[in-house]
Image (spheres, helix red, strand yellow):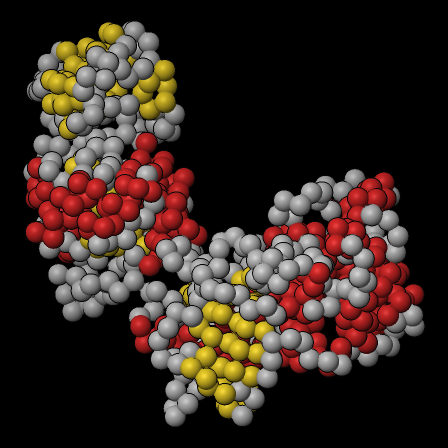
Amino acid sequence: MIRVAAYLPDGRPGPGRLAEVELEATVTGPAELTLPHLTVRDERGGDLLDPADTLVQPPAAGGGPLAGAQADGRARAFGITNAAYHARRALDFAARLLDRPLPHLLVRIGMHDAPKRWGGGHYRLPGAAMPAEPYDVSPTGEVHLGGGRTFVHSPDGCDARYFHAPAHNASIVYHEVGHHICRHTADFRVNSSRPRGEQHNGKVALDEGTADFLAAVLLGTPDIYGWHRGHIPQWDPRRRRLDPRWTMAYLRPGNGGQAHANGTIWASALWSARERVLAEGGGPDDFGRMLLGGLSRLGACEGPVSEERDRRNRFSELLRELAAADPALAPAVLAAMADHGIFPEGRNAHLRERMRAGSNAAVVT
Amino acid sequence: MRRCRLGGLSAPPRLGDLVVAEVTRVGAHERLEDAHGRRVRLHKGDLVVGACGNRYATDFYEGYHRPGPSAHLLTAGGVIGTAVSWHTSCPVPTELEVLGPLTSEDAEPMSLEHFARPRPPVPPEDVVRPNPLALAVVGSSMNSGKTTTAAGLISGWARAGLIPGAAKVTGSGSGKDRWTYIDAGARHVVDFLDFGMSSTFGYPTDRLLTTMSAMRDALLQDGANAIVLEIADGLLQEETRLLVKYLPAVCSGTVLAVGDALAALAGVDLLKESGVPVVAISGLVTASPLAARETAAVTGLPVLSPATLAEGAALDLLADPAPHA
């Protein structure tokens, strides 16, 4: 057990409350922590973690290229411990609800950072990807986090700037670990039936939405990205705030990069369903267990890949599996989902048309 | 509102003086920027107001302020002078007849100097100020990609959440570069017009040097926290050559915009002789991956396209600024 620093979710827009936490981890390299079923490594090199010294490093306002080498080193060390804490928390959450641990996850920090900068994250499996991956990707999955490219407001509320390093932002870590959970449950791209080195790295709306919902649960707020997207109005889809207003009427057809926006519809519906379950006396984990059960059921069928890909892309199919995973909660969940235009039958386009036909003009924009 | 009129010719106009002229023949410049920056189409017989000045543009005109009734429109921004040579691809200049000075209500000739912004106050010597984040952009020649490079830096800084400021230190009066900076995300922009010069060619070097520092300080005063200073023309242009020697006093490094590897090599050598740190190569050369690789090989410097600068590389160029003189 080691003692490290991390931001703890506090339900407010911002990185959370800075605290010292215990972590069941071992320093396995100058910039690497190893935990059960999890490895977190900063790929940019440098002696960031010294087991003989304190591992409690300050966030140093995110470090970054303008911070100076010492502050940037501290910020990167904090990024490792912070990402490890949140990845561990997300994996523990999934393991508890699934009654099994997920396969090993490798989190690489500081990826795709030269000559351009990258301020996001992605989940990767071995296979074609854009941009190309510089390393062999672990067959069980990897989360990649950029080194950061933008300043945001400092969490202490003053005018000072904070370099938005994705490893400092629990919402990004949770979202990407959410993809790992999806890969080893619903497996939306049917990768388990594909050759080991030819995995599909694309994400469908259900994948993005489920990852956003899991992030919201772990953060305790529907405004998942309120820290680094706080400048975007809450009504703007790019904010990706989970909200009852996002219904199937807003579904954007086609495969061209709409997965996040379409995923917000699914995530918002999940959030509404969870609220409904809690309001009706359900326990805090009840809906999460139902969701993970539904994801596992969706991924359990072994039909032809093309048919399974199509089936696993449908909102109605996953909703049906959720209902089957916990029939007791099904009425509340189906009612909440219906408010978002999601029903247990019909293709996505049909659900969209049905919602649009029943919507007033003020909703369908 | 300031009321102006056409005055009588009492003394020859000087650099920067505003004059009223009639268009006698529309040539290369078919349009002239109005007070809002819109390029207004010119017709024979139109009355226009411009500022007397010179122009040094190897791809366009070589022109000088020569008081007299006949003149040329040297830029679309309204610099009026006499073109003495021009690039073979350039049409003959638009011809003007100077009618007289633009005068104020009290009949005094008006000059850009009357509109110059005050120089920012110099802080007391005992006040320690952090070194501002500032880079210069210089080039091997006209049209080597300096303004596009500056726009890439501005865009990269703006996207990173910084407050970019941009200064066009030298050149000939025209709104084109100012609009390019603003479109790229510059929150604050100054150029030599703001400091009373219609074009910088022919002004004393001392004036240009103090103006360069004043521009940077003005942008800081306005609220910018990442600044680009663009110096016009090529490094061999006389005033540019003198100015670059003083760049270490106003910025932490220089981005060199070039069209090919040979120009990059020569430019880096010239800048090193002047003690100016070159942090990257950019400009037209980056349009060709092969030429970019050649440039990187001979200079050992990062070769970054304006698009790459905009996508984050601009931020790294501000890292670890060298101590200022």
Q: Is residue A323 above or below residue B168?
A: below
Q: Is residue A161 above or below residue A91?
A: above
In-image side of B214 versus A254 (left or right): left
Q: Residue at x 77, y 64 (%)?
A: A299
State the image quarter where residue B234 is shown: top left
In-image side of A234 versus A266 (left or right): left
Find the residue positioned furthest to the front. Answer: A195
State the image quarter where residue B103 is shown: top left
Most foreground residue, B95 or B320 = B320
Residue B223 spot, x, y in % from top left: 34, 54
Q: Which residue is drawn at 45% across and 61% down?
A: A134
Q: Is residue B253 above or below residue A326?
A: above
Q: Does residue B18 appear in the picture of this structure?
A: no
Quarter of the picture containing the N terminus of chain A is bottom right
Q: Is residue A126 above or below residue B232?
A: below
Q: Which residue is drawn at 10% across and 38% down?
A: B236
Most foreground residue, A241 or A248 = A248
In-image side of A44 versus A234 (left or right): left
Q: Does residue A114 appear in the picture of this structure?
A: yes
Most foreground residue, B297 or B266 = B297
Q: How many marks?
A: 0
Residue A133 spot, x, y in % from top left: 48, 59
Q: Residue at x 17, y 40 (%)?
A: B263
Residue A225 spot, x, y in % from top left: 59, 63
Residue A247 spot, x, y in % from top left: 77, 51
In-image side of A311 versus B262 (left or right): right
